[in-house]
Amino acid sequence: MFDNLSDRLGATFDKLRGRGALKEQDVRDAMREVRIALLEADVALPVVRRFIDAVTEKAIGQDVLRAVSPGQQVIKIVNDELVRTLGGDPDEEEGAPAPEESRLKLEVKPPAVVMMVGLQGSGKTTSTAKIARYIREKHGKKAMMASLDVARPAAQEQLAVLGQQADIATLPIVPGQQPVDIARRALESARLQNFDVLMLDTAGRLHVDDALMAEMKAVAGAADPAEVLLVVDSLTGQDAVNVAKSFTDEVPLTGVVLTRMDGDARGGAALSMRAVTGKPIKFAGTGEKLDALEAFHPKRVAGRILGMGDVVSLVEKAAATVDAEDAERLAKRMSKGEFDLNDLRTQLKQMQNMGGLGMLAGMLPGMKKAKAAMAASNMDDKVLLHMDAIIGSMTAKERAKPGLMNAKRKKRVAAGSGTQVQDVNKLLKMHQEMSKAMKQIRKMGGLGGLGKLFGGGGMPGMGGGGAGAPSLPGLGGSGGGDIPPEIRDMMNKKK
Ligand SMILES: Nc1nc2c(ncn2[C@@H]2O[C@H](COP(=O)(O)OP(=O)(O)OP(=O)(O)O)[C@@H](O)[C@H]2O)c(=O)[nH]1
């Protein structure tokens, strides 16, 4: 699991922290954890080996040994290797477009044929419509779709329905016509009607077999496709990679579409795919809706693998421990953009239940600053108890509006809670940062939105309906599996 990878890395690198230099043995110990995590994520063994070797070699190098923060250095090396394994360049600029090899090559004499192949149920038909739509939105090109699936009853109708939904032309169905003939008719029709692109949705099978491959070859021969995209279900892990390997050997694939990335928190298929097949992943399907398709960005996916998986385990922990009533009250307030010291107190209680402050803050991308504030004030879980006492010594008014407190009141509160004025100030500073972070998270659709991205439930206490908590209004996720652009940006920025 991805959260295992980050858990393991976190635990291992915590041990490394503060030692000043990385010893070979430390790196090897850390890599053992990485290896287990990757294998658990269903990454193919040769890919795991290559990955570990590459990281080990770089990590034991001179530069790393001189580093101030060895743990972080290794995390960076692991991250960069993830990006490379996914087919990206770790040094590319933030916000750069998808790598060249991941882009569609449509600059041929129109109509450019995009042939979709894959097993039954992989999401081929849905992806065909998604890509036709994508081509219109991102390339400004007009696409026509044709289904060559004469094996599955109603497959052609399914594509026609999707075409209607997305306002994309489909080739009229002629009952009884065979795939190669349909392909020829589609080409002719697309040419006559001046379509830029022709999407061919081919038949699937339950397994790779000779008849299927023969049909794919015949269609490719007749249609001379500019792109042959293999659609595989990322949830099937190494099976997806094996399917891809079989197709690669038979059909001139130009790229891979990984569907159901919205439900795949492990990324094993993504990590193995390129290394095993040598074909770039061009798109990731992120939901059932027709706009749930992303150009494949290795850096983003690497970021998700390393960092964002934390959110899932956080969600699970939260679901098990958070008091549902508190959570609902807090969510309501936060949905109005309110977060005072009473809320902070509730939140602190929940954080304690969930394993402490630092852990929680470390998990939430929006909480970076709050975490820095905590680190700066040397806050640990003992301080968490003090904070509860400090807030308990304030008046109701002060809890609602902490800005009201003057120096004299702060002194009183400190005395009343058995702490120092500087502790009170630290707490206020932290509240400020958290309240900012909360607003940011709220803007992004709430933690529910984050949780849903990775197939987890929402995060109770902060919105979204997690197991064991009621569905909370206001802050819920953005629905579906769509990744809101803000979160996408955030995932991109997060290293
Ligand atoms: N969550 C999620 N669901 C998807 C995704 N892509 C496709 N699906 C769903 O998966 C199911 C199967 O998709 P289809 O497009 O019918 O599969 P297919 O490969 O064309 O199947 P055949 O035509 O039988 O070969 C549908 O319910 C889709 O909505 C995705 O990226 N995420």
Image: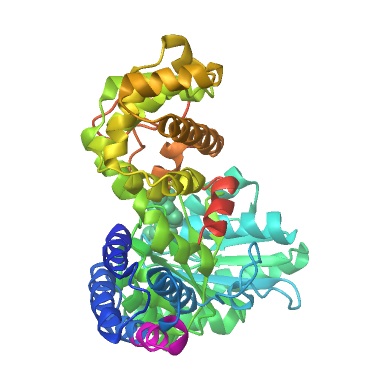
Q: At which x and y percent is residue 400?
A: 47, 15
Q: Image point 65% across, 69% down: which residue?
A: 93
Examine the rendered structure and indicate whether residue 149 appears above or below residue 421.
Answer: below
In the displayed structure image, the side of residue 313 where residue 427 appears, left or right:
right
- Would you say residue 130 sits in the magenta stretch? no
Q: Is residue 223 visible?
A: yes
Majority SS type along the magenta span: helix
Q: Image point 54% across, 24% down: which residue?
A: 337
Q: At which x and y percent is residue 375?
A: 42, 49
Quadrant in the picture for residue 133: bottom right
**Residue nearest the viewer, comparing 321 with 344:** 344
For the N terminus, the quadrant is bottom left
Q: Is residue 171 visible?
A: no
Q: How is the image coloured?
A: rainbow
Quadrant in the picture for residue 208: bottom left
Examine the rendered structure and indicate whether residue 255 appears above or below residue 288.
Answer: below
Q: Image point 28% across, 41% down: which residue?
A: 381
Q: At which x and y percent is residue 430?
A: 47, 36
Per the rendered image, the range of residues in magenta is 53-64
Examine the rendered structure and indicate whether residue 339 appears above or below residue 362.
Answer: above
In the displayed structure image, the side of residue 97 where residue 229 appears, left or right:
left
Q: At which x and y percent is residue 417?
A: 32, 23
**Residue nearest the viewer, comparing 412 with 465:** 412
Looking at the rendering, the quadrant in which ligand 1 lies is bottom left
